[in-house]
Image (cartoon, rainbow, N blue to C red):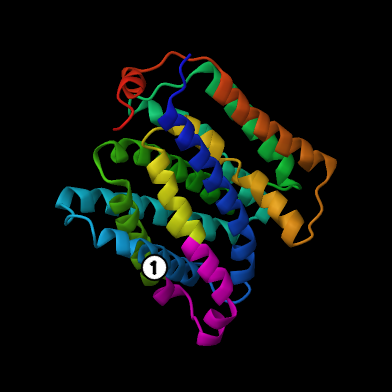
Amino acid sequence: MKPNTNAVRADMMLLLVAAIWGSGFVAQRTAMDHIGPFAFNTVRYAIGAIVLLPIILRKPRMTRIQLAKGVLLGLVMAAAAGLQQLGMVDTTAPRAGFITGLYVLFVPLLALCFGQRTNTGHILGIILAALGMYLLAGDLSGTVGRGDLMIALCAVVWALHVVLVAWLVKSADPISLAFVQFVTVAAVSLIVERTTETTALTGLQGAAGAILFSGVLVVGVAFTLQIIAQKHAPPTHAAIIMSLEAVFGALFGWLLLRETLSSKELLGCALMFAGMILAQLWPHKRTKAEAAELIDPVR
């Protein structure tokens, strides 16, 4: 079977996205020691927009439809981030991380609403990814509370974001979508920060390194690459690869924060990688769009 060059390139981008997001866990933990979550989101998404500004200035002026698509993505992303932060007040970090990661289960369900098919390899890959996340999560004991329910809703909204990206990027410029999305998240986060948090200059200075790393790489580079890659990757397929964020997060925690990885957590990492490989290698019937890309790969 002839490989789809665009699809392979998209998969490599998504793997890089997962690695960058995973490394971002370290920066986020560091920043939270100095400033609140909404202040952090305000500044880092603003930096992400600034990273793309030189490219945006060279592009034709965006239409109202393009702006509306970017704002829609930004509002969905801001809602997901907000629900996650609010939910974490009433639950533990391992539970929050595990439940958030379950967005990979919701993506294929929501994708059906947009006419996206899911093959057997994707389903098996999702199951392995979910099992791997469970093993990586650590202690999940305790009763289900309000915070857990908010995090679960957050996972649904993240899944919606992945599906919307795949739908909207088909008829829009990825860089423009990313730029407007970042500006929207920064604006929404600023409004919430002004009403719920008190941010001191010393706090921003203390978190400067983490903010810069997250703003440039996690937001400016990784979220932009996600949108570019999803132009050639079905949402369920993309979600499985991006779920490796948890694996890279554990690995970077081990390398940079000297956190230990138990045999259970290592097994979780192995299962998640196996899920990605299974989803990649499982034979599937190409859609008309995929077949067209093999004939005319420059799209």
The spot of residue 165 in percent (x, y) is 36, 41
Q: Nearer the viewer, residue 90 or 35?
A: 35
Q: Is residue 88 left or right of residue 160?
A: right
Q: Position of residue 201 (x, y in %)?
A: 50, 86
Element class at badge 1: helix
- Which range is magenta? 193-216
| Image quarter hosting the C terminus | top left
Question: Horizontal and vertical percent for residue 137?
Answer: 71, 45
Residue at 67% in and 29% down: 274
Q: Is residue 147 visible?
A: yes
Visible in this render: residue 144?
A: no
User: Looking at this view, is 151 or 233 the one in front?
Assistant: 233
Q: Is residue 244 magenta?
A: no
In the image, taking residue 70 as reference, residue 76 lies left or right, namely right
Say whether residue 119 is left or right of residue 30.
left
- x, y percent for residue 141: 74, 46
Q: Which residue is mark 1?
A: 46
Quadrant position of residue 244: top right
Mark 1 residue type: Ala
Closer to us: 194 or 279: 279
Tell me: residue 296, above or below residue 217.
above
Q: What residue is rendered at 84% in x and 40% in y?
A: 263
